[in-house]
Image (cartoon, grey):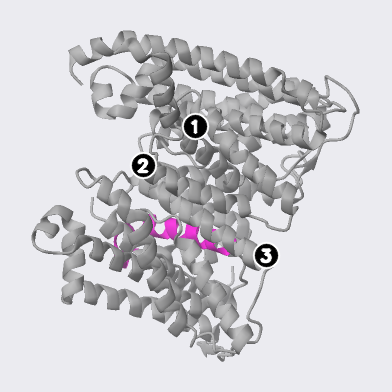
Amino acid sequence: MDAFILSYAVVNGLLQGAIYGGVALGLSLIFGVLRVVNFAHGSFLMLSLYISFWCWSLFGMDPYLSALITVPVMFALGYMVQSVVIAPLIRRESAMVVEPLSALLLTAGVFLVMDNMALMAFGPDVRALQGAYYIPTIFIGGIPISGQRLIGALAAFVVALGISYWLRHSDMGRAIRATAQNRDAASMSGINVPAVYAVTFGIGCSILGLFGALISPFLPISPSIGLAFGIKSFVVVVLGGLGSISGAIVGGIVIGVFEAVASQFVTATSASIGSLVLFILILVFRPQGIMGRA
Amino acid sequence: MNRFAALDKTPQARGLRLTQTHVLLVIVAGLAFVPLVVTDSFTLHSIIMILFFAYMATSWNLVCGYVGQLSLGHAMFNGVGGYVSVLMFTQLGLSPWLGMLFGGLLAMVLAVLIGLPTFRLKGPYFTLTMIAFAEIVRIWVENTNDFAGIPLKGAEGLIVPNRGDDFWAFQFSGKVPYYYIILTFLALALAATAWMERSKLGFCLKAIRGDRDAAEALGVNPTRYTSIAFALSAFMTAIGGSFYAQFFRYINPERSMGLELSIDMAVMAIIGGQGTVLGPLLGAAILTPIAELARGAFGGGLLGLHLVVYGFALMACVLYFPKGAIDPLRKIFRKIAGGGAK
């Protein structure tokens, strides 16, 4: 194996992996606070990809600029899903811990509705923002690096750091962390728990709005892409440790580099099977993930 | 629950089970007359699909409904059943009636191998693992044209060659024979569930569902009993996969082992009432007609419409009828049938 090709694969894997991590951040955040596995995670990404696409194709809007639309829309949608769909479950089972499976089923319902509404509205065709955007490829040590992917990867780090800082230092962040630790104690200290949950869900989804806008220029867009990214996000988050922000980025990079390097030796299909095998092994042998606490 | 409450409940429970058996017999007997009334081929096809999904949801329910583990990977067993029986038929000339048994056995082995390390995973972790296993199998088949000389034909799928009206080839010219075959399968699956509910296996599974650690402390081996049930469920699902392959004479990885089928099975059992004998049948009877109507009324025009309805139904069910649609019916039934019991 040529060292140059290998280093090219590693660099690209790093970028792709950081983007995977960025996409998975919201899933981890929502699980960490609400203990809800959001099965519809990928659907929110799919929807924001479509919003970016339509903004570009109907109004000629710059895909990056469409983040100004996708981020608030996804926040509102996430806020709504939490307060309309999931909150009644949490209220009903307030005496007990929310049964995680019921919440998973609810979000599976949201996934079915969102993905198939997109299928009905847009059809199964694959769309692409062809030539919508051109960011020059830069060369570092002779290795070509896609500018768009680099921006996506940097955004993942910025968002992860930003969320961590915000969780640590803002009032809302403290309220979110307190709620994550103990819902009832937080409630007794005067924290509006339903509002915290809805805001957390909204933020988790708005991150997807941002990444939808950032990755739309180089991704083929179809209704089923949400599920593909959703499953990838589960793998990433479980690998890094469910609920951990830094774990999502680390897990994403591990998966990204693993797939990029593995596909130099075996087919890309076997590489994606490999990452699912890795996922199962982690769940069976180290369910807390790489970064998670035991 | 204290000891006395348990004692108090026993006679009533016995009475209920008896009536449930009666309901079961009435439903199956009633269904046996359907082809005499329905002669329209399209309608009969739709009813066969209802029975097929009722059978699949019942197979899913056998383990998932009773142990309380949510598997969204059951389509994998369906695919194994379909692929094994079709390949044995096209490659070895073996009758699908025998091929489906081999498919079922392979699915059982697969289920035990998967179940042993994963059954102790809790809640969403188990669900995600099952999705991962099913996706591995699907992606592998979709991208493998030839495995050790076996032509899997990748994403293209397998076609069952037409043999005309031939019982051993599991091929019939009309739809009525298929109807009675799937009705028989469904009746057997319902009987197996009803039997399991009363057997030691059923009680152990319920104990495991209630509290795994406590059940283990009482000497119930959770791994053993869940593995048995899981293998049984996988076997039945695989048999359903063989039926599907013979009925449509075509299978591909996307349709026969994709996530959508797994979700269909689970959603029907959950909406009908998981952990009950008749719930999955009810769920399939509620949901499948929606899919069939959407297909009939709009052709391919409104792709995915029925799944939107499934999604809303699933949410409504989890929020307002966590025990499934069978629960309110049961209460009414109990009032009519067993009013004097308490």
Residue B230: image tag: none
| CA gap, disc 3 and disc 2 | 34 Å
| CA gap, disc 1 and disc 3 | 39 Å
Residue furthest toward the right? B164
Instruction: Determine which quarter of the picture holds residue B181.
Output: top right
Q: Which residue is mark 2?
A: B123
Q: Which residue is mark 1?
A: B113
Instruction: Determine which quarter of the picture holds residue B25.
Output: top right
Where disc 1 sits, the SS reads: helix
Question: Are marks 1 and 3 in one subunit?
Answer: no
Instruction: Give the side of residue A249 with respect to residue B105, left or right.
Output: left
Residue A56 is inside the magenta segment: no
Q: Nearer the viewer, residue B157 or A50?
A: A50
- Give the x, y percent position of residue A122: 64, 68
Residue A237 is inside the magenta segment: yes
User: Is residue A250 visible in this depiction of the protein?
Assistant: no
Q: Which stretch is magenta?
A: A224-247
The chain under label 2 reads: B
Where disc 2 sits, the SS reads: helix
CB-based contact (under 8 Å), mark 1 and mark 2: no
Instruction: Give the side of residue A280 with respect to residue B294, left or right.
Output: left
The chain under label 1 reads: B
